[in-house]
């Protein structure tokens, strides 16, 4: 109960009530647990009050409570967003010493915060030529740097840096290759991405579905839809099952190419395989239909979304898009049978 109340205090901006809640917990002999500290740290981080977040974090450590992935990700990513890269690096080191799995997960969260080429490289450069003396678990710092530079789309720099690290004894893992492959795919260097996939296999690593999702995404964005579909069909041979992300990537590629019939076939296939279409699936399909001016089918899909019980925010945004398209069409023609759009809008109002 108190954990929820603490979260509510931060959301309501009534921070003066926080000390009272903590005092009440103490009076009842209730000790803060990892969830309690997680609520406190998340709240202070969201407010940008890192001194208080630190206080809660180190109090938790001193009590022998190890930070979990959620806490670690929150505090590290908050430091990263504030540009406190040195502090983020120190926290990452500490977390890696406590639990390498938590440290690795936090490094992944840190790299989501955006391209900071010079800052992420600073983390890596701070180790200099002493790379081989760093415990294996702390090699996650290199992955942070590599992923961060990948975010800045400096793929050529990454390849050079990776080559230097290999000479220093760094052993790239699945996360390293996944970052590189994703970066190359987004940058349109699909052939380079496939070469990295081959290097990964030569290193004795097995590419997972995330790697193939990145490759399929790169092929779709470069217009190689047939090659993307061919790779998709080979997934079972590799012992992999497509995820909703795999399907959404292909559906997006086909919709952007104006091939909505193939996109809908993929939606039917994912349903047959027991994968429920997500809000992204529906949104992508409706965008594709609106692009073609197919309002009637868009309305049918909106009805399907309602039956599927998707969240209202998704429904509202899609309804607005369809309504705008319908209104534009009404200006140029006296179309009939489109009152469903109006009735939906009135119903949602």
Image: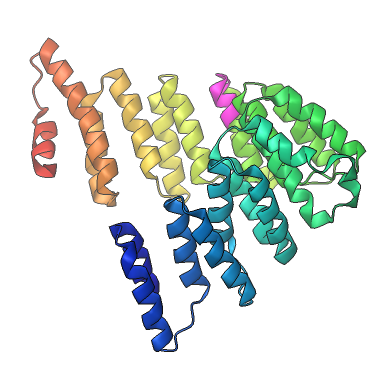
Image coordinates for residue 256, horizontal then vertical, percent: 43, 22
Q: Work out whether residue 274 can be spotted.
A: no
Quadrant for the C terminus in the image = top left
Image coordinates for residue 115, horizontal then vertical, percent: 59, 32
Location of residue 78 with respect to 154 vertically, above or below: below
Q: Residue at x 26, y 36 (%)?
A: 317
Q: Locate residue 95: give its quadrant.
A: bottom right
Image coordinates for residue 122, horizontal then vertical, percent: 72, 37
Quadrant for the N terminus in the image = bottom left
Q: Residue at x 78, y 28 (%)?
A: 159
The residues colored magenta run 217-225
Is residue 85 rendered to the left or right of residue 25?
right
Location of residue 294 with respect to 197 vertically, above or below: above
Image coordinates for residue 99, horizontal then vertical, percent: 70, 64
Is residue 135 rendered to the left or right of residue 44?
right
Q: Work out whether residue 41 can be spotted.
A: yes
Q: Residue at x 7, y 15 (%)?
A: 334
Q: Is residue 239 located in the magenta-colored stretch of the structure?
A: no
Is residue 16 rendered to the left or right of residue 307?
right
Q: Locate residue 200: give its quadrant.
A: top right
Is residue 297 rendered to the left or right of residue 337?
right
The one of 232 and 106 positioned closer to us in this rendering:
106
Location of residue 282 with respect to 252 vertically, above or below: below
Q: Residue at x 32, y 20 (%)?
A: 291
The one of 103 and 28 positioned closer to us in this rendering:
28
């Amino acid at each position: 109960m108190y954990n929820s109340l603490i979260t509510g205090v931060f959301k309501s901006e009534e921070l003066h009530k926080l000390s009272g809640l903590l005092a009440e917990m103490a009076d009842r002999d209730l000790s803060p647990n990892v969830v309690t500290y997680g609520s406190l740290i998340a709240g202070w981080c969201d407010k940008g009050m890192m001194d208080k977040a630190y206080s809660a974090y180190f109090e938790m450590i001193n009590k022998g409570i190890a930070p979990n992935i959620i806490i670690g990700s929150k505090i590290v990513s908050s430091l990263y967003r504030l540009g406190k890269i040195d502090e983020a690096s120190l926290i990452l080191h500490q977390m890696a010493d406590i639990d390498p799995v938590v440290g690795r997960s936090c490094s992944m969260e840190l790299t989501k915060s955006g391209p900071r080429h010079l800052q992420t490289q600073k983390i890596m450069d701070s180790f200099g030529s002493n790379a081989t003396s760093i415990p294996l678990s702390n090699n996650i710092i290199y992955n942070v740097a590599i992923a961060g530079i990948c975010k800045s789309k400096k793929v050529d720099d990454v390849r050079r840096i990776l080559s230097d690290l290999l000479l220093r004894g760094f052993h790239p893992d699945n996360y390293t290759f996944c970052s590189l492959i994703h970066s190359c795919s987004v940058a349109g260097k699909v052939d380079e991405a496939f070469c990295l996939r081959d290097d990964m296999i030569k290193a004795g690593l097995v590419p997972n579905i995330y790697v193939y999702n990145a490759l399929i995404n790169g092929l779709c964005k470069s217009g190689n839809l047939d090659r993307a579909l061919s790779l998709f069909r080979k997934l079972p041979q590799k012992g992999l099952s497509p995820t909703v992300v795999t399907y959404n990537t292909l559906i997006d590629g086909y919709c952007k190419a104006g091939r909505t019939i193939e996109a809908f076939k993929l939606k039917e296939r994912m349903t047959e395989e027991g994968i429920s279409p997500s809000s992204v699936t529906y949104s992508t399909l409706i965008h594709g239909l609106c692009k073609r001016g197919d309002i009637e089918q868009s309305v049918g899909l909106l009805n399907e979304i309602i039956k599927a019980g998707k969240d209202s925010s998704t429904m509202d945004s899609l309804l607005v898009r369809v309504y705008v398209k319908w209104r534009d069409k009404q200006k140029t023609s006296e179309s009939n049978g489109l009152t469903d759009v109006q009735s939906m809008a009135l119903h949602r109002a």
